[in-house]
Amino acid sequence: MSDESQHWAPRDPSGAAAAPGSHRGEPPGNSGKNRKNGRKLRTGWRRAVPTWRMALGTVLGLGLLLVGGFVAGYQLVDIPAANAAATAQSNVYLYNDGSVIARDGDVNREKVKLSQVPATVQHAVLAAEDRNFYSDHAVDVKAMVRAGWNTVTGKGKQGGSTITQQYVKNYYLGQERTVLRKAKEFFIAVKLDREKTKDQIFQGYLNTSYFGRNAYGVQAAAQAYYSKNVEDLTTAEGAYLASLLNAPSAYDVVAHPDNEPAARHRWNYVLDGMVKEGWLDAAERTTTEFPTPGEARPSTGLSGQRGYIVQAVEDHLDRRGILDGKTLATGGYRITTTLDKAKQEALVKAVDANVVSRTNAEREADRNVRVGGASIVPDTGEVVALYGGVDYTKQYVSNATRRDYQVGSIFKPFVLTAAFVNDSTTQDGRRITPNTVYDGSNKRMVVGVRGPTDYAPANEDDVDHGDITVRTATDKSVNSVYAQMAQDVGPGKVRDTAVALGVPTDTPDLTASPSIALGTANASVLDMTEAYATLADHGRHGRHVLVEKVTKDGAEIELPERTTDQAVSREAADTTTAVLRGVVEGGTGTAAQAVGRPAAGKTGTAEEDRAAWFAGYTPDLATVVAVMGQNPKTGAQTSLYGALGLPRVNGGGAPAETWAAYTEAALRSSPAQDFDLETAPGSDEEDEPPADEDHDGSTDPSSSSEPTTGPSGTAENNPAGSSPPTSGTDTGGSNSGTHGTAGANGGSGGTGSTGGTGGDGDTGGNGDSGGG
């Protein structure tokens, strides 16, 4: 057969004639392979399994997608501003021993520098939370994926984040548990690790972490658990605080005693980790004992005295130009005051015992009782105790710093000092000393060089004291004597002396008129304490100091240096002190003798008994206490008549008793000191001179006793602000039985209106003067 016939042979339709090696249904020459690439085709279950090429392509694709996503995320997610909660800090107010008085912010946080945190405390935190923090990257991808998966699947919060991630969550984001938050946390942590040092991140972490007991940051935690600053924490205490970071509520062994086994286990884990990392000596580890923390203390808000103290400190910082209110409101300031905790508590206790405990809710007058107190160390000016009221949350206005009550006769010593400073004389030219005799008649008209004025203050209970020395007039707080003395010295000079001693120049009603002697000025308790401290310090004056140190974020703020000057001569101040000792020894202030050591002081009662005062001092402590009357509903000043179950409250009663109880307790651990006085010549105490009356009732100037004030002499002219002469003549009128009366011939030159009767020997002249 030819080739041609062979080529055109018919094909077997059954496939029997197929080429050898071929399969049924496959084209000839294919042999089960792909025509294009010659690879064998996958059949059956193998068709569902991706090839290695497909797997590689998928992995590469995902890798590129992840890289692209990372790059996009890194570019799109910026480091945000810190959240408000993370930056909020409270201002912390401290006693001079470092113990906390109060915090005034909603967030209990106080930032510190990393250098303030002991190395052992730093290592304890690292051992508890992230031992490789300083060597590893910002994120732990494995732990982060695990945490994210557990969040998605509802398995709850899982640990494992690095310190950097935790800091990002605390400082920049928040505590919400979402995948988006975790993604942001990742990118911010990576960026932060490139832009900040490890120390900066660790410092931020320590200042933002929550430790329980409402304590944010390690400093607040140190105070909350151990009542100390972070600098003073021991290794054991640091390890306990580090343990709390994992689960604060689960490891507080005081709030939940049943937590102690778990807390001890975690604490041991931290210490063992420190040993393992070489941060703690093994021998020290074996001797370290579990540091049970103190009781959880109630919030140091503004109740009790705290609010008054915070208010006074803020005012002090503002007035002295240290920090204004707006700056202080930003928070984070650590303010160490000069207040002494023991003395502060002694003052509160003394007020409670001598005033508060004597009140009765059923007595209407007792509902109006308010108390203010302040205590200053004379030679340093440090305010060591301050009493603003029964409770800041109940009585908002501080009775220690308010300037709306008359100070009464505690102002009289300033008149006396002014007389000594200016070497003043009476109207008839006699030098004023403690032994100078004045007419103490009730409602005696004050006389100037032009004759009688219209000012005639009444004495307590309208008593006529007759001729008495300045010393006795001080002991008995005789208004008529001191009003005349103020006129003799010159009201303007009296005002200047009071300001030099420490009474602020802007004190309301510090008016240069004869009534200034009776305490018409509205100085605060703190103001008057400063002035009396000047007398106690022999006439040296320096402004009172309430703040000892201010820091923020570990940096100290410069405070103005306290300076002193000789405001009045030592002789003048010491002579006044010598006279005021008599007030305590035998005058209106005898209740102060309960202090049991040498003391000087003066009682005072405001017009209509609206306030009763005692101002006193020992050589080492000056204190003023005032009891005030104020309607709690209207805020109006009220009389103290009937308060504390007494017909009237005067300075020699509850105020002097409170002063003595406080001062005795405050100085109990100090030896009693006597006054070292250098008094003026002729001021030694003498017997009261007898009155030698002539035929018209005036004192004979030639008698052995010093004559009382008359119109002649070299006294200065009636200054501006003093009361003008009355329309009556200065030559007429007979004052039978009185001595040294006004007018050329001893008569009264007219009548003057008088105010209400005051306490402790003092009354109000013209309705506006104070009492004693």
Image (cartoon, rainbow, N blue to C red):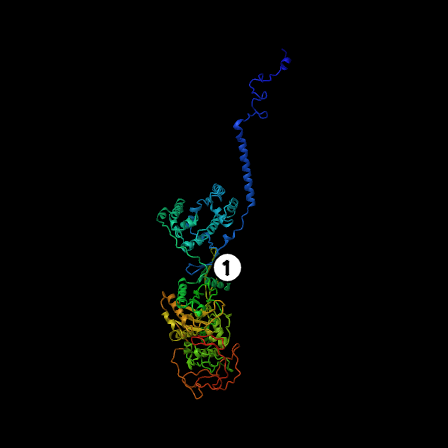
Helix or strand or loop: what does disc 1 sit on?
Answer: helix
Disc 1 marks which amino acid?
Answer: Leu
Q: Say above or below: 625 vs 155.
A: below
Q: Count the marks.
A: 1
Give the residue at mark 1.
328
x, y percentage for residue 533? 43, 69
Residue at the bottom extreme of this rendering: 695
Place of residue 466 in the rendered image (x, y in percent of width and height, measured from the top left): 42, 82
- Picture layout, residue 173 above or below residue 101: above
Q: Image check: 493 left or right of 281?
A: right
Residue shown at 54%/35% (left/top)?
60
Residue 322 location (% of width, % of height):
50, 62
Q: Assign the N terminus to one quadrant of the image.
A: top right
* Residue 304 versus residue 43 in the image, above or below: below
Task: Decide: few, some or many residues near mark 1? Use Cα within 10 Å; few <14, some 14-19, many ≥20.
Answer: some
Closest to the observer, 170 or 494: 170
> Is residue 538 among what the camera can see?
no
